Image (spheres, grey):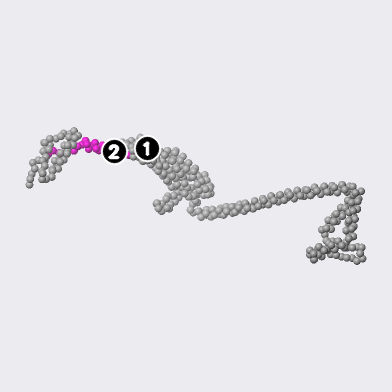
Amino acid sequence: MMKFPGFGQRNQEGPPDLDEVFRDLSQKMNRLFGGSGGGDNERNSPSEGFSLPIMPIVALILLIWLATGFYIVDQGSLGVEQRFGKYTQTTESGPRWHWPYPFETVTVVNMEQVRRLEVGYRSNAEGSGGKSRVPKEALMLTEDENIIDLQFAVQYKLKSAKDFLFNNRSTDEAVMAAAETAIREVVGKNKLDDLLQQKEKGMHDTQDRIQSILDSYGAGVVITSVSQQSAQPPEPVQEAFEDVNRANQDYQRQINEGQAYANDVVPKARGMASRLAAEAAGYKLKVENEAKGNANRFDQILTQYNKAPEVTRERLYLEAQEQILSNTSKVVVDQKGGSLLYLPLDKLMAAGGAGNAANAPVAAATTAPSASNSAESSRSLDRERETR
């Protein structure tokens, strides 16, 4: 077996000695960082221990430690830096650096994220689409001492990263407590029927009240919306309330039907009343004019009567008889003849029809010439007396 003269020598036929390789590397590092370069004694002394470059390793570790202080704040987020647990500053979005742990720590807070809390119910796992009730949160007392099962959701965002981290032990619990307090206060000031019929009644007031409570806590939270999910009576009496609702719907339906009927009848009645009023006004005017005309005629007759009472009286009598006899059935009798002739004109007119009715006045006129002559002579006598 071939032997080599020393550790610094290499054999052309075999691999180099590992101790020699590490020793050469150590010497080069020491010379690079100011250490002793070493000599032949160090190379050829097999008892010399292997020495590592301490300073370069420390410097490398220090650089790595300082590099851990770099961090990036995303858009819509803020970074909160703490030095030995005490707040120092809030950083905006972008690349930042702080003294690494354990001197300083940083917490990046998402300010744009919309967080959601459910009060009175809990949604099931994604995909199922159902939800489970939480009676302890949902049952509330109304102003009229009834109980309502009310479920709603609260959405909020952060407005102060510092307050969010240092003023809250649990932000969700703080918002939940404020929401329950506010909604119970609003429900306690409203009646059950109002809350059931007006689904969003009081939600705006609830949002303002929640925000006021959280601001007093300094929670660093802003409420974006409060949406009501359901409002119904408690489950044990829900069927009875549904019966009441159906009765109210029937009542409202009948009112609507009555209103529709009234809208149809009232205008017609008003139109008829207007027409009757117009007809009555016309009739009134007609009667008044007739009365005025009759009064004027009576005044004229009175004037003539004062001038010739006998003639006027006889004329009035004859005119009255003419009006009476023209509207009644007549029987014409000739008293001068030897025999009595009875002619029932009314029965002949009813039995004979239009033809007999046309012939009957002719017969009556031929049968009683003396009566017509006497009437004509009386009228001429009246005219002579008036001229006198």
Res. 375 image quadrant: bottom right
Residue 146 seen in the current view:
no
Residue 44 in sight from this viewpoint:
yes
* Circles 1 and 2 in contact, beta carbons < 8 Å: no
- SS class of the residue under badge 2? helix
User: Between residues 86 and 79, which one lies in front from this camera angle?
Assistant: 79
Chain part drawn in magenta: 46-71
Residue 103 spot, x, y in % from top left: 31, 36
Q: Secondary structure at mark 1?
A: loop
Which of the pair 329/112 is nearer the observer? Answer: 329
Q: Inspect the image, locate mark 2, and give the three-letter code of the amino acid beneath it.
A: Ala
Mark-to-mark CA distance, 1 and 2? 20 Å
Q: Is residue 52 magenta?
A: yes
Residue found at the far top of this picture = 34
Task: Identify the residue shown where x is 80% and y is 47%.
Answer: 292
In this view, 1 is above or below 45: below
Q: Position of residue 256 (x, y in %)?
A: 59, 52
* Residue 38 picture quarter: top left
Dot 1 alpha-carbon crowd within 10 angstroms: few under 14, some 14 to 19, many 20 or more: some
Disc 2: which residue: 67
In the rendering, which numbered label is found on residue 105?
Answer: none
| Residue at figure coordinates x 42%, y 38% from the top left | 218
Residue 99 among those drawn in magenta: no
- Residue 277 position, x and y percent, is 71, 49
In the picture, the disc for residue 92 is 1
